[in-house]
Amino acid sequence: MINIVPLSEVPHHASHITDWLWQAFGAGTSREFYDSIVRSSLNGAEYPVTFVALDGDVPLGTVGFWRCDLISRQDLYPWIAALYVDEHARGNGLSEALQQHVLNYARKRGHEKLWLWSTFGGYYERFGWQYQCDALEFPDVRVKVYSQDL
């Protein structure tokens, strides 16, 4: 059975999560940058929170709940960020479960809307995300911004 928990409950997986994020999203960015994000989610602050999907004690995927994930749109928050599912765990609904977990988490904290961005379209719409606009990820990558009402 898959269980989704805060990384703060299983901090021994922090390095593994850092490696996933760096490999998936880190083109041109140091591993230390991703390590600092993951480690800051262990401090117990409201943001960021990193969640891990586990099968027993084996990590299958991760997702973040962040205050800011798009520097050019700091007026929007909170964000679902750094969604990653390990290759061998894909195709079984885990991405949807991770998204839903953060949606529920944000709703319980009184937020009315959650945001995400992507470099591609056609995926997140399947899960109820509504395209809002284009924006720029630093330094000049055009991205699509989505939201979902809670």
Image: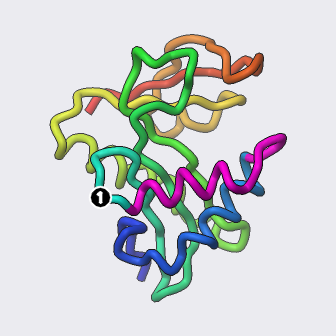
Q: Which residue is drawn at 62% across and 21% down?
A: 144
Horizontal side, residue 133 vs residue 21: left or right: left
Horizontal side, residue 129 vs residue 21: left or right: left
The image shows residue 43, relative to residue 27, as above or below, that is below
Tally the numbered discs: 1
Horizontal side, residue 2 vs residue 35: left or right: left
**Can residue 105 be found in the magenta stretch?**
no
Horizontal side, residue 69 vs residue 76: left or right: right
Which amino acid lies under the numbered mark 1 shown in the image of this protein? Gly
How many other residues sit within 10 Å of disc 1, few (<14), some (14-19) or many (≥20)? few
**Can residue 28 be found in the magenta stretch?**
yes
Q: Residue furthest right?
A: 28
Q: Which residue is drawn at 29% across and 58% down?
A: 44
Is 17 in front, or is 132? 17
Is 93 in front, or is 149? 149
Is 129 in front, or is 26? 26
Picture coordinates of residue 83 (x, y %)? 56, 50
Q: Which residue lies under the disc numbered 1? A: 44
Q: Give the range drawn in magenta.
A: 26-42
Picture coordinates of residue 13 (x, y %)? 54, 76
Quarter placement of the N terminus: bottom left
Q: Residue at x 53, y 38 (%)?
A: 126
Q: Residue at x 18, y 42 (%)?
A: 109
Residue 97 visible, this angle? no
Picture coordinates of residue 19 (x, y %)? 70, 65
Kind of element beneath mark 1: loop
